[in-house]
Image (spheres, grey):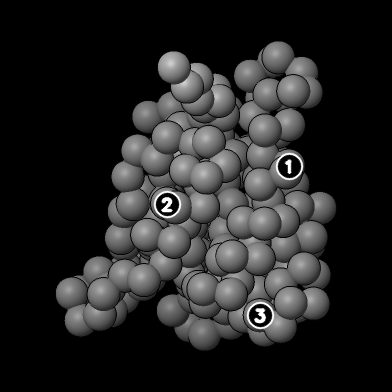
Amino acid sequence: MEISPPQIGRALVVIVDDRVSHGERADTTGPLVRELLEEARFVVDAVVVVPGETVAIRNALNTAVIGGVDLVITVGGTGVSPRDVTADATAGVLDRPIPGIAEAIRASGLAAGAVDAGLSRGLVGVSGSTLVVNLAPSRAAVRDGMATLTPLVSHVIAELSGLGSV
């Protein structure tokens, strides 16, 4: 009998993309984030797609926090165009920002050649007892961002649960 390692926690993925939300394009990053989270021992509750609108993004984040997930990963809407409002929406729901993780994701992404990750306005922080992370939308930015984030997540979730580091 094989015993699987314990789960770290529950996660939700929020894809912020106008074209995907309107059915004009298929979502290619949601399945990738789900796969990477499952490899990191998370149970992924869902992958949700919303348009690049502050209210829609904020509603998705608040629903995740109220639903008690441990981690929310948003993908998209982190750039500088007028429709890139994910960081602005996220700022409105965070209780405590964690700028060091956001900076590490940007630096690592830029070093790996994911320009959108390096130029991202994405935030990382805590809302209630949920860790919220904004990632840039390219597959390279997602892969690199998750590689940077994964070693830190279990520590943050343990701290939020009051159990200390794991």
> Where residue 71 sits in the image (x, y, percent)?
53, 39
Q: Residue at x 42, y 35 (%)?
A: 43
Q: Say if residue 93 shows up in the picture.
A: no
Q: Say if residue 16 shows up in the picture.
A: yes
Identify which residue, 2 or 110, lies in the foreground. 2
Label 2: how many Cα within 10 Å (few below 14, some 14–19, many 20+): many
- Tally the numbered discs: 3
**122 versus 26 height, above or below:** above
Residue that sits furthest to the front in the current view: 1
Q: Quick one: label 3 or label 1, which is nearer the N terminus?
A: 3
Identify which residue, 35 or 146, lies in the foreground. 35
Element at badge 2? helix
> Where residue 109 sits in the image (x, y, percent)?
71, 72
**152 versus 80 height, above or below:** above
Label 1 near label 2: C-beta < 8 Å? no
Residue type (three-letter) at the residue carrying disc 1: Leu
Label 1 near label 3: C-beta < 8 Å? no
Task: Specify the quadrant that holds the N terminus.
Answer: top left
Label 1: how many Cα within 10 Å (few below 14, some 14–19, many 20+): few
Q: Residue at x 52, y 85 (%)?
A: 81
Would you name the residue on which mark 2 appears?
34
Identify which residue, 119 or 84, lies in the foreground. 119
**45 versus 148 height, above or below:** above
Mark 2 and mark 1: span between their CA atoms?
18 Å
Label 3: how many Cα within 10 Å (few below 14, some 14–19, many 20+): many
Q: Residue at x 51, y 52 (%)?
A: 36
Element at badge 1? helix
Q: Is residue 160 left or right of residue 55?
A: right
Would you name the residue on which mark 1 appears?
152
Residue type (three-letter) at the residue carrying disc 2: Arg
Would you name the residue on which mark 3 appears?
114
Q: Which mark is residue 59?
A: none
